[in-house]
């Protein structure tokens, strides 16, 4: 198996280093990932004519439903799958080296929230716990293990018990992180309103068909009022990636140094948008070295000159033609 020096990925210090490494990753994946190579060839983009990381082809995320996207011969020990209805085809993310994922999420978490050892971490992720293969559960479970706090753990549907635990921790001034899927946090906020002073509330998105979809501002307003916090934090990640972005409020996300968000024109998917314009979100995730680091998602968003970004929603099915145009 061809190895890539992953130490470089997690030690990027500036934009030039990112650009250089992104091009090295592009070359590596072009040479070692048949699916990606065919896609690039179809667009007539090769390492010979790509000289900037913004010129790299972004593989439509739907390829993870139909192809085995791997940049190595090594067998994938871990396979993460997306949640889907019984009718829908789920995405499969083959992960040959789980240690890279662990290093990625731990370094990113420490960058934005400090060491998990210093937090009590409570997870309200019922829809994810009810199935296997969730990369989010893998990450949160690992953070809970590292937290070392006796009360850290998962809650399924026992909202009353969670309510009592949160109030007890808050009274004891314990630094707490409550991470939850949107519909479950809404249930908690509506059924057990409280006023939390020492708790970070982080939503990971997703109504999963359990509740009416709300725009983010509405969701955050209800959660802030019901849980008594000033800001709602958010995590932006997906099955097909090995890195996450985080927002500490107002829906403005930051990424770790090995991840970058750019947007594409919704009508012309090969054209990169300028900052401040709404477009389809393209992700560069250099930690995803043995899969594909350049992915065109079905999310809509905006980027800003300081490197932050906003997620504004998703393409509905009729709007994904921008991606479908690119499917081989």
Image (cartoon, helix red, strand yellow):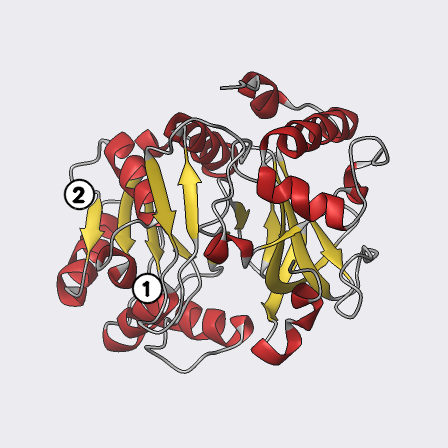
Which dot, 2 or 1, sits closer to the camera? 2
In this rendered view, identify the residue nearer to me: 25 or 103.
Answer: 25
In this rendered view, identify the residue nearer to me: 249 or 296.
Answer: 296
Seen in the picture, residue 247 relative to 220 is either above or below; the reply is above
Residue at numbered disc 2: 151
Q: Residue at x 85, y 33 (%)?
A: 51
Q: Which comes sooner in the sequence, label 2 or label 1?
A: 2
Q: How crowded is mark 2: few (under 14 residues within 10 Å), some or many (20 or more)?
A: some
Residue 135, image x and y in percent? 37, 46
Seen in the picture, residue 80 relative to 29 is either above or below; the reply is below
Residue at numbered disc 1: 195
Alpha-carbon span between mark 2 and mark 1? 19 Å
SS for dot 1: loop
Residue 318, image x and y in percent? 62, 80
Q: Which residue is drawn at 30% across and 36% down?
A: 142
Q: How many labels does the image show?
A: 2
Q: Residues within 10 Å of mark 1 (few under 14, many from 20)?
A: some
Image quadrant assignment for residue 55? top right
Left or right side of 263 for 157: left
Left or right side of 66 for 311: right
Q: Which residue is drawn at 39% across and 26% down?
A: 99
């Amino acid at each position: 198996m061809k190895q890539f020096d992953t130490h470089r990925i997690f030690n990027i210090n500036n934009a030039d280093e990112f650009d250089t490494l992104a091009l090295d990753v592009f070359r590596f994946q072009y040479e070692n990932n048949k699916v990606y190579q065919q896609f690039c060839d179809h667009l007539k983009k090769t390492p010979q004519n790509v000289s900037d990381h913004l010129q790299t082809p972004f593989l439509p995320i739907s390829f993870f439903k139909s192809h085995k996207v791997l940049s190595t011969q090594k067998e994938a020990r871990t396979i993460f799958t997306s949640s889907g209805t019984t009718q829908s085809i789920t995405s499969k993310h083959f992960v040959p080296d789980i240690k890279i994922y662990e290093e990625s999420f731990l370094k990113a978490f420490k960058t934005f929230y400090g060491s998990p050892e210093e937090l009590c971490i409570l997870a309200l992720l019922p829809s994810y716990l009810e199935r296997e293969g969730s990369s989010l559960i893998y990450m949160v479970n690992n953070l809970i293990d590292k937290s070392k706090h006796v009360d850290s753990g998962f809650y399924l549907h026992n909202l009353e018990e969670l309510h009592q635990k949160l109030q007890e921790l808050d009274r004891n001034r314990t630094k707490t992180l409550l991470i939850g899927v949107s519909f479950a946090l809404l249930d908690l906020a509506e059924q057990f309103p409280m006023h939390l002073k020492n708790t970070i509330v982080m939503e990971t998105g997703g109504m999963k068909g359990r509740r009416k979809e709300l725009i983010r501002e509405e969701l955050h307003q209800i959660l802030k009022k019901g849980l008594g916090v000033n800001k709602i934090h958010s995590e932006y990640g997906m099955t097909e990636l090995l890195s996450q972005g985080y927002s500490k409020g107002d829906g403005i996300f930051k990424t770790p140094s090995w991840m970058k968000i750019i947007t594409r024109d919704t009508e012309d998917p090969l054209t990169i948008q300028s900052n401040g314009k709404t477009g389809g979100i393209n992700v560069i995730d250099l930690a995803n070295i043995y899969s594909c680091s350049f992915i065109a998602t079905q999310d809509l968003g905006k980027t800003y000159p300081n490197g932050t970004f906003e997620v504004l929603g998703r393409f509905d099915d009729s709007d994904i033609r921008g991606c479908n145009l690119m499917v081989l």
